[in-house]
Image (cartoon, rainbow, N blue to C red):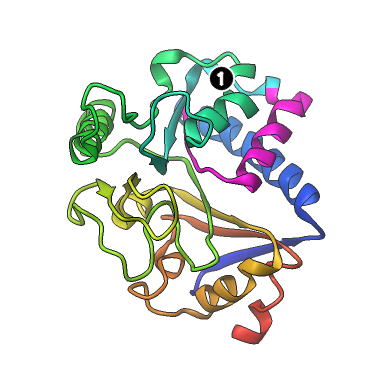
Amino acid sequence: MTGATVVTHDDREVLAHAVAARLIVKLIDAQAAHGEASVVLTGGRVAAAVYRAVAELPARDAVDWSRVDVWWGDERFLPAGDPDRNETQARAALLDAVPLDPARVHPMPAADGPDGPDPTAAAARYAAELARTAGSGPLPRFDVLMLGVGEDGHVASVFPDHPIDQPGQPVSAVRDSPKPPPVRITLTLPTINTAEEVWLVATGADKAPAVGVALAGTGPARLPAAAVRGVTRTLWALDRAAAAEVGAAR
C-alpha cells in the first residue's frame, strides 16, 4: 500500500492512549473547520481500549460532543443490547460518558429492530440513514473512520474471498461470515474509502502477517485491508508486535 502513514507504539496500552489523543484532536480540528465532526467507530478489544482512553482523558472536554455524529463501520446482527454488538461495547466504554446528542448517534439496526431478522432490509435502512444525513449526496462526510484488522486481513465485516450481499451499495448484509456471528452488516469498501481519514488499528503478533502483506501492497481481492485508503490520509497505528513484519514485507 502506497501513501500510508505507519506509527508504531511500544504496546497496546500506549497505542490506545495515543490513538485516543489523536482522535480528540481530530474531532476538535473538524469542528473548527466545519462546525461539527463525524466519526465512524469499529469494534474489538483494541477499539474498546481506545474508547476507554478517550473517556479518561481530560482533553475530551475540549470536544463539543453535541456536535459529533457517530456511525459504525460494521455490526454483528444481534438483538439490541447484546454484549457482542459493537454498539453495546462503544456505549459502555465511551458514548454513555459524554454528552452526545442522541439524534446524532447512528447505530446499525439490530436483529430485533424494525426489519426483524432480515439483514438485507436492515442494511438498506442504514444506507437510507446515511443518505438522509448527507443531504445532497448518498453519504455524509466522515472525518475519521476507524478500523480493526483481522488475522486474515479483513476490515469491518469485509472478509477475504467472501462475498457480501450488496456489493454495489454503500451498506451490505453479510451472511455465513467466516468469523462468528454469521450474520452481519457492513459498510462496503467504496463507502469506507470516502472518509477523509481512515485509521487502521492493530495489535498483537497474530496480526503481523496480515499487516505486513497489506502494507506491501497486495491486491484488494485477497486482502481487504490492502484496499482501504482515506481521501487525505491513511494511518496504520500498530504496536511493535503487529508491526513485526512490516519491514520484511516491503
Q: Nearer the viewer, residue 40 or 139?
A: 40
Which residue: 71% across, 39% down?
21
Q: Position of residue 226 (x, y in %)?
A: 45, 70
Quadrant (top left/top right/bottom left/bottom right) for the C terminus: bottom right
Q: Quadrant of residue 230?
A: bottom left
Can you identify the residue that label 1 sits on? Answer: 65
Residue range highlighted in magenta: 37-60
Q: Is residue 43 magenta?
A: yes
Q: Amino acid at mark 1?
A: Trp
Q: Quadrant of residue 38?
A: top left
Residue 52 makes an appearance in the image: yes
Which residue: 74% across, 46% down?
18
Q: Nearer the viewer, residue 52 or 131?
A: 52
Other-residue count near label 1 (Cα within 10 Å), few / some / many at <14 / 14–19 / ≥20: many
For residue 113, above or below residue 12:
above
Q: Nearer the viewer, residue 5 or 204?
A: 204
Residue 250 makes an appearance in the image: no
Q: Position of residue 177 (x, y in %)?
A: 36, 56
Q: Position of residue 37 (x, y in %)?
A: 48, 30
Q: Position of residue 114 (x, y in %)?
A: 23, 21
Indicate left or right for 123 with 86 as reference. left
For residue 41, above or below residue 238:
above
Q: Quadrant of residue 57?
A: top right
- Judged from the image, the secondary structure of the residue bearing numbered disc 1 is helix
Q: Is residue 92 magenta?
A: no
Indicate left or right for 200 with 248 as reference. left
